[in-house]
Image (cartoon, rainbow, N blue to C red):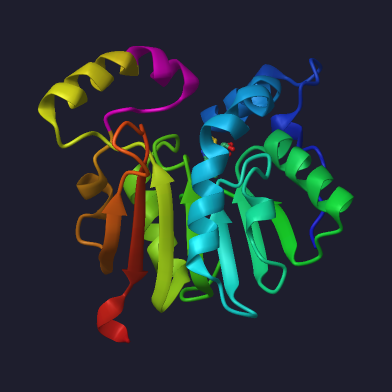
Amino acid sequence: MSTVTPHPQDSKDKSDSEPKRSRVPHAAKLYHNLVPAYQAFWPAVAGKNIRAEVGAMQLPEGARVLEVGVGTGLSLASYPRHIQLTGIDLSESMLAEAQTLINRKGWDHISVQPMNAEELEFADDQFDVVTSFHTVSVVSNPAKMMRELVRVCRPGGKILIINHFRSDNPLIARVVDSAGNVTKRLGWRTDLELEEVLRELPIRIDQRYKPNPFSFFTIMKATAKPDQV
Ligand SMILES: C[S@@+](CC[C@H](N)C(=O)[O-])C[C@H]1O[C@@H](n2cnc3c(N)ncnc32)[C@H](O)[C@@H]1O
């Protein structure tokens, strides 16, 4: 299990020189500052969908699972203990919360490590299942992140995404787009289209739906590289 130690680029240390700070990826700084607020309200908003969808996957014994943008570890309790889960995130502050939870629960089937979702440091086809919740609209290059998710997932492996995507209904899309000026201050795009990030990827969408008609979120379940199976 890896241990997360504070990373100089994600540190609050005021003695950090400005040039070093300017190299910090936007999302890492932003999510460092958001940890307390995030812990306070986010589990209620997002936890239910994650629990339901991870549970429904019925992950088999020994499955190698990667979660991209694992954050503070909201999802971790949803995974069964008989799998091997690797979680990655750009923000060391978010990961430190996840690591504390892992240590407290004694979850030796889970490890977390700092990594950029757009440049995953894993070989091709290394995971049976790749998941990502509420992250693809936060990274700087969503299409690049999705390419990476598909690359590291084995042929026939499963991909589960929960995220907000732009509505197909033009009226709803326009209303939500207008909220985008506020949410983009949180580093979060509201106008991302699923088709935009999946274009030309070797992936088959198996299911795409909303958990309820009023939900802001979409669930996408897909199979990676189906032609190679
Ligand atoms: C809205 S939070 C979602 C966290 C978690 N998946 C959840 O649902 O609670 C978005 C997460 O994406 C992470 N993130 C943003 N850009 C990233 C990148 N390029 N690579 C990896 N993680 C990134 C943030 O640090 C943050 O933890």
Quarter of the image for residue 89 reads: top right
- 182 in the magenta segment: yes
Residue toward you, 124 or 171: 171
Q: What residue is drawn where x is 32% and y is 15%?
A: 179
Q: Which residues are magenta?
A: 181-191
Outermost residue to the bottom: 229
Q: What residue is drawn where x is 76% and y is 27%?
A: 11
Residue toward you, 191 or 115: 191
Residue 138 % position (x, y): 44, 34
Residue 18 % position (x, y): 67, 18
Residue 206 visible in the displayed image: yes
Q: Is residue 22 above or below residue 200?
A: above
Q: What residue is drawn where x is 55% and y is 60%?
A: 55
Outermost residue to the left: 170
Residue toward you, 88 or 132: 132
Residue toward you, 49 or 157: 49
* Quarter, ligand 1: top right
Residue 177 % position (x, y): 25, 20
Q: Which quarter of the image is occupied by the C terminus?
A: bottom left
